[in-house]
Structures are given as C-alpha cells and as structure tokens.
Image (spheres, rainbow, N blue to C red):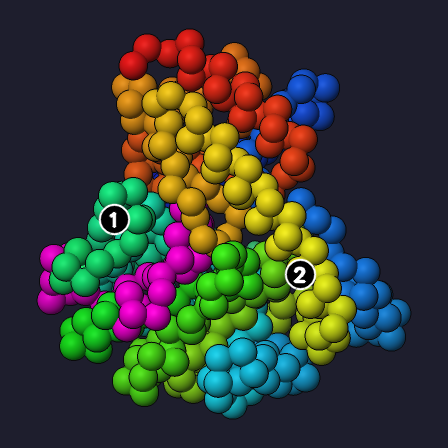
Amino acid sequence: MSTPHPLSVWARNIAPSPTLAIDAKAKAMLAAGEDVCSFAAGEPDFDTPEFIKDAAIVALKAGKTKYAPTPGIEPLRVAVAERYAAEYGYQLAPAQVVVSPGGKFSCYLGILATCNPGDEVVIPAPYWVSYPEMAKLAGATPKFVLCDDQAGFKLTPALLKAALTPKSKLLVLNSPSNPTGAIYNRAELAALADICVAHNLYVLADEMYEHLIYDGHQPVNFSMLGAEVEQRTITVAGFSKTYAMTGWRLGTLVAPAPIAKACAELQSQMSSNATTFAQYGALAALKEKAKATVALAEMKTAFDRRRKHLHAELNKIPGVSCLLAGGAFYLFPNISSFGLKDVDFCARLLAQEKVAAVPGSAFGAEGYLRLSYATSDEIIKKGVARLAKFCSALKR
Ligand SMILES: Cc1ncc(COP(=O)(O)O)c(C=O)c1O
C-alpha cells in the first residue's frame, strides 16, 4: 500500500487566520461558562437591521433561490454603481461592479486578476491578515513595509519608494485600517497615488470600513484621485461592517471594465454568484437610505463612544501607549515596553485575566495588541481594568 502524497504547497504554506482562531478560542471559553472579556472580534456586535433581513426573507419566499448572474443581480450592481456616484462622484457602469461572496473574496479576486507568479505585492504592515496569504496563493511574493506607530501606522511616499523593485505589481492600501484603525487623508493618498502611477502599480484599495470614520473626517475613494489612478485601482468594499452583515457573505469590487470582467470570470469558476436571496437584503440596504442611515448612525455613535473611552483608559496604563485611531473599530496599543513577545503577552493575558486580544505580530507588527471595541461598554470597562491589573504585575 502506498502512502498518499503530501498535501499541496498551497495547503501547506497557508497560515490559518490568527484572528479567527483567537476569536474562536475566546468564544469557546465563553461557551464553557468562563468570564472572558473578548477584544478579539472582527465584526460589529450589532445585529443586521430588520429591514435588511425582511427584504431577504421576502426574496427567499418569492423563490429567489436559484443561481443568479455570477457578478451579481442586476439591480444590486446598478445600486452599487449609484452609491459610488452619490458618495464620491465616481461614475461607474454596472458592468464594472462585481458582487462576491464576501469582501475577503473580492480582495482575492483583485489579486488573482492582476498578479503573476513572481510578482511582488507591496503590503504595508500592520496589515489585515489575509493579504499576504492571498498574494502567496496567487504565486506572488508579499513585500512588507513596516509602518509603526511613529509613522501613524501609515505608508509614506518614502517608505513606498524604498520598497519598490522591478517586480512590484500591486500595492494594497487599506483605509480605514484593520488592525490599526488608521485613516489616510486625501493629500496622503494623492502622494502615494502619484508613485503608483509613476511606477505602473495596480492598487487594491480596501475600503471595507469606509463608513466607520469618526471626528467628522470624510472617506476618500482612491480611484477618484485622477483618471490614471482610476485605471489601475480595484476598490473593495462590502456590507459586512457597514450594515452588520458579516454572516451574509457579501462583498463588492469595482474596477475598470477589463479588470472587473476578469474578476467575474475568475469568480465564475471559483464560487459562482454570491447567495441570491442575500443580495436582495443588500439591495434594501442601499435603496432604503433613510433606514440605513439611522441604523449606521446608531452603530457609529456606540463605536465612537467606546473608541474614546478605550483609548483614554489604555493610555492611563503605565507602559502602554495608544494612538487614537480615526476609523474602523480597532485600537492598536504599543506594549513593547514590557519586553514580552506579544504572543506570550496575549497568551498570559487570556490565561491569567481572561482577556482575549490579538497579538500585533499576527498583523506583521510585533509589540502591539489589536483590541476590537465592537463589544459592549461593560466588557470594555471590565476588560481594560483587567488589562491594567495584568500590566501592573509585569516588570518594565
Ligand atoms: C480590511 C478588511 N478587508 C476585508 C474584509 C472582508 O470582509 P468580509 O469578507 O466579511 O466582507 C475584512 C474583514 O474582516 C477586513 O477587515
């Protein structure tokens, strides 16, 4: 009898998502009755608004249970195009819109459509955990650029230029950022866009958290920085974070027509359309603007309050320093003064104080924690007090 071959390099080289793993561990401890304060979640702690659920239920009952066109039902593609026009003045044909089974898949399509084996994908760190793995699955090489808290966790033109080689093909830009919450302003993006044009780079603009921006700042759509920028930009967004629809698995991608067509063709062989009746829920989210605005405002108000509270409390802890992030629902405090590896810090924090946090090294930045404040005010208060107690017992 022969032993089966080893699994493929794709299977062996992929790193499982550390954020999902820690979140799952915290949830399992909670389910076992342990008093865990989890800052590990990557999703809003709100439920999907009722009007969105109702629209999907109506669609389900009306028999919207069959295959749909791969890039999405036509009214949803039109509605996505309309919302880009209304929010950013970005005029798109519906053919430039691809609705996917999740923003994660949209990112992967964007990378697959543009990168060849051997190409380099420039990924500013701290980065969202999936980008490097996606680049590797496309046969490309991730090229990391560390942008620490001194740099406000943001890529600068100098850092970008220093990372470029003749093999550079794609830049991933995520604003607001998961894991740091950092947001780029228009001038910062424009300076990076000039370099992308000059060096003929594609850009994957992951704008998943575009509607979760605080302090009155406005989101900037990368494509709108100029015609030459638009030609090379794939914008990813979705419904997960804006409408608390993480489990629905619906994302979007908009791009110049040839890229969108390629993405739709890739999707046609990899997954087909995103769930048909779910797309009707997303359509309601875009069409019923008054209701959507109320639901989003409620969520944002809660996130903003928690953001400020958590930020203030973290900075009161001797040895911890934390920037006030402008978007998403994460803070990324620096814990390097304790001289512990962040993985060990998190393991001990969970074991001793039952506080779940994700180590910065999972995002390519050792010495930090990612704390999600998409959890109740009560958990935040209790969790940060435990974190303070834990830190006070550590040597510095
Ligand atoms: C930066 C970023 N991009 C994309 C996604 C993908 O979102 P989804 O696949 O739930 O639509 C996430 C989810 O955590 C994210 O944080």
The amino acid type of the residue labelled 2 equals: Leu
Residue on which the image places disc 2? 296
Query: In whole angstroms, how far apart are the C-alphas of marks 1 and 2?
Result: 30 Å
> Farthest residue toward the right?
61
Label 2 residue near ligand 1, CB within 8 Å: no
Residue on which the image places disc 1? 151
- Disc ID at residue 281: none
State whether residue 203 is above or below residue 5. below
State whether residue 144 is above or below residue 166. above
Q: Position of residue 234 (x, y in %)?
A: 40, 73
Left or right of 209: which side holds 341? left
Position of the C terminus by quadrant: top left
Residue beneath the point at 69% across and 67% down: 293
Position of the N terminus by quadrant: top left
Residue beneath the point at 40% across and 58% down: 183
User: Dot 2: within a 10 Å radius of its alpha carbon, few (fewer than 14), some, or many (20 or more) residues?
Assistant: some
Q: Is residue 88 visible?
A: yes
Q: Is residue 284 visible?
A: no
Q: Position of residue 273 (x, y in %)?
A: 61, 71
The segment highlighted magenta reads 162-190
